Amino acid sequence: MIKLKRVYDAADTTDGLRFLVERLWPRGIKKIDLKMDEWLKDTGPSHELRRWFAHDPKKWDDFRKRYFTELDSRPEIWQPLVTAAKHGTVTLIYSSREPAYNNAVALKEYLEEKIK
C-alpha cells in the first residue's frame, strides 16, 4: 500500500516506511526533525519540469506525462519504492501545499501502475 502525507503532518505508526520524494529539502524543517527512512531526491521531477509545472492544474496532464517519461528513463530510482510497497505500507512524504497536483500524487499513480 502506498500513502501520501505532507512533511508538516505528524508521523504515525501506520505510515510504514516513510520516503521524502522531493528534489529540494522542505522549508522550515530540520533534517533531524523529519521522521523518514530515506530521502529519495532523484524521484522528484527535474528542476526544469518542476519550474515549468509550478503546481498549475491546467498543466497537470502534461506534467504527469513528462514526469512519467523521466521516471521511465531511470527505473533504479523508483524500483526500491515498488519493492518496499510489495512488502508493506509506504508513505511518500512531500512538501507542496497543493494536495491534488503535486509530484507525490503523480509518483503514487506511477508506482501503483508498476506494482500491478
Image (cartoon, helix red, strand yellow):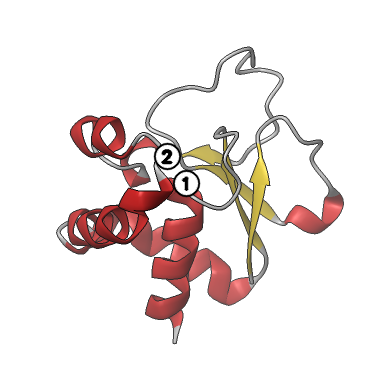
Q: Single out the residue that lies furthest toward the right.
A: 13
Q: Is residue 71 left or right of 1 when viewed as pictured? A: left
Q: Is residue 73 above or below residue 11?
A: below
For label 2, count other residues whose C-alpha is less than 10 Å away and answer few (under 14), some (14-19) or many (20+): some
Q: Disc 1 on helix, strand or loop? A: loop
The answer to the question of whether label 1 and label 2 lie on touching residues, with beta carbons closer than 8 A, is yes
Question: Label 1 amino acid?
Answer: Asn
Q: Quadrant of residue 22?
A: top left
Q: Position of residue 113 (x, y in %)?
A: 41, 79
Q: Nearer the viewer, mark 1 or mark 2?
A: 2
> Residue 7's image quarter?
top right
Between 115 and 32, the one lying in front of the other is 115
116 or 63, nearer to the observer: 63
Residue drawn at the location 71% of the way across and 20% of the way down? 33
Measured from the top left, where is residue 53 in percent x and y? 31, 40
Which residue is found at the position 46% from the left and 68% from the top?
Answer: 109
10 Å neighbourhood of mark 1: few (<14), some, or many (≥20)?
many
State the residue position of label 1.
102
Kindly give the residue lying farthest to the bottom in the view shown.
116
Q: Position of residue 54 (x, y in %)?
A: 36, 34
Q: How many marks?
A: 2
Dividing the image into 4 quarters, which one contains the C terminus? bottom left
The kind of residue tagged 2 is His
Q: Secondary structure at mark 2?
A: loop
Q: Which residue is mark 2?
A: 55
Q: Give left or right: position of 101 versus 95.
A: left
C-alpha distance separating marks 1 and 2: 6 Å
Relative image position of residue 61 (x, y in whole percent): 32, 61
